[in-house]
Amino acid sequence: MARPPYRELLAAASLLLAAALATYAYYPIPDWRLLLAASGMLAVYAASTSVDGGVPVSVLLTLIAASALASPASPAFLVVVPLAAAALLAAMRGAGRPALLAIAASAAFSWGYPLLPILAAAGYLAAGGRRRRLHELLLPAGYLVAAAAGYLGHPAMAASFSLAASAALAAYSGRGLPSCPFRADRPLVAAGLLALSIVALASPVLPAPPLLATSAGALYVVVAGLLAPVGSSEKV
Amino acid sequence: MRPGDIAGLIKPSQTLLLMVTAYCSYLAAGGRSPLDVVVLTAAEALAISGTTAANMYLERDIDALMPRTSRRPLPSGSVSPAAAVAISTSMFLSSVVVASLRSGALALTILVGFISDILIYTNIVKRVTPYSVVLGGIAGAMPALGGWALAEGFTPGGILLSAVVLAWIPMHIWFIATYYLDDYRMAAVPMLPVIRGPSYAARYTEYSTAAIPALAWAYYAIEHRGVLAAIVATVLAAVAVKRAEDFRRTPSRDAALGMFKMASPLIAVVFVLEAIEGLLGLP
């Protein structure tokens, strides 16, 4: 097996770190910021697998990933770091629409700045062109609800919708990992996304323990689908 | 889809064995609540079954290649891949909901079990390294830890009991892999007996099996109960190591099957004794 490129390792690591963050968000002390950080890592996966470019792009994506990972323990004003990295990424030649996904990455964990997810969602819609599938609209809708919930002071709802939207971003925008021993498994990813959507919709009424635990579990299903072994075939 | 097909997807006998470790750990830790037992039963049965079904879904390509597993519900076509995903996901997530409503610690063990079995073992290491069961074994140890944690939280006694399961897993997996060596070779699954040979794998199972009584005695030293379980674990592990050593000298399929058949009763007896001693308050 050839050694996978750095960008694909970053993508796979982002998914595993998202799963770890979601678990830590649940236990020992419920912490919504960790769920937001997990959604940021999902968006890093999406950007890592879809943004073109060389070493500078990889450096910027690594910076965004590190910012997402550290965001629960970082001062809020440090959100400017991933934002600046995402803006640089968007300005790069050839990055185009996928670079906006990186902006979404920075927005996903920008707790305290609910305007940013709205900008990310608007950017996603603006960059998408005319042809659009229905499920793609769920993504910006999820970010918009997350932002609104953030403004209205419902952190659980904001984090749940942000996680579901970022998982959709990872599932629909990521192009997979052709040089890694993984492939995206559609049924498993779809099942995980469905579960995350149900959890997000139920977030206003669910108590914190089952909400966080089920969010983590549903995220695992998505990650298991995105990192399914290459050999497993849907045709079997 | 018949009920038998669903049963084939969730391996009831394996599920039952792991649930025995969960119940016994719960009782050994001093748990006595009927509601806890109901939650433990529902949560572990759903979690183990759902995780097993997810594992079967992701390994259906391998299962189709091996004669031993080619008649399983997915490769045989009696259960569709989409149905398997629906069953596994709904079971696993239901278990998380049930467990988290009662105990954060129990739900955590279920989540860690899924990470270990699906994300780490099935998705990443099983097709890459012959030592995959060492990481995948963590999933098998989680029901025991979950049962204990439900009663007492994460304390050293529970970690030692779950480590007993972890130490037992190489014996359980590598001898059946030895018995079906040609199957695994055909499917290009790098199990230790395939890559390094049955004797080499048997040597490792001797080390891990020898760790079982050591862990049982450590449990006794910390919890001040379980002496009978420790004595029985020592005797059974000694017999297993002796038979593994005989196998290493003259490997045969029949001997490998005999070792595999010995594995499940060994762990069941040790855990039942731990539970009885905990229940009766014996030293």
Image: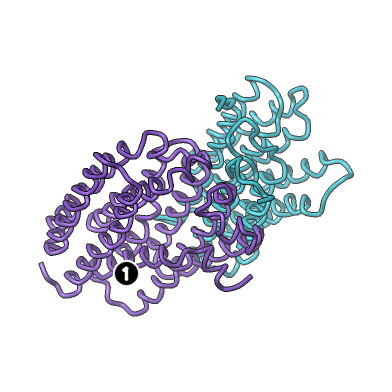
Residue B126 visible somewhere in the drawing: yes
Front-most of residues B170 and B25: B170
Q: Chain of mark 1?
A: B
User: Mark 1 is on which residue type?
Assistant: Tyr
Quarter of the image for the C terminus of chain B: give it.
bottom left
Q: Position of residue B45 (x, y in %)?
A: 44, 68
Q: Position of residue A199 (x, y in %)?
A: 60, 62
Taking the spot 77% from the left edge, 53% from the top edge, the residue there is A135
Classify residue B6 as left or right of residue B200: right
Taking the spot 65% from the left edge, 48% from the top edge, the residue there is A185
Taking the spot 56% from the left edge, 48% from the top edge, the residue there is A224
Q: Which chain is cyan?
A: A
Q: Position of residue A76 (x, y in %)?
A: 54, 40
Spot the residue most to the bottom.
Answer: B34
Residue B275 falls in which quadrant of the image? bottom left
In the displayed structure, B207 sits above or below A190; it is: above
In the displayed structure, A216 sits above or below B194; it is: below
Residue under label 1:
B23
Classify residue B248 as left or right of residue A169: left
Q: Position of residue A48 (x, y in %)?
A: 64, 33
Front-most of residues A209 and B97: B97
Identify the secondary structure beneath mark 1.
Answer: helix
Residue A110 visible somewhere in the drawing: no
Q: Which chain is purple?
A: B
**Disc 1 packing (10 Å; few <14; some 14–19; many ≥20):** many
Q: How many marks?
A: 1
Quarter of the image for the N terminus of chain B: give it.
bottom right
Residue A14 falls in which quadrant of the image? top right
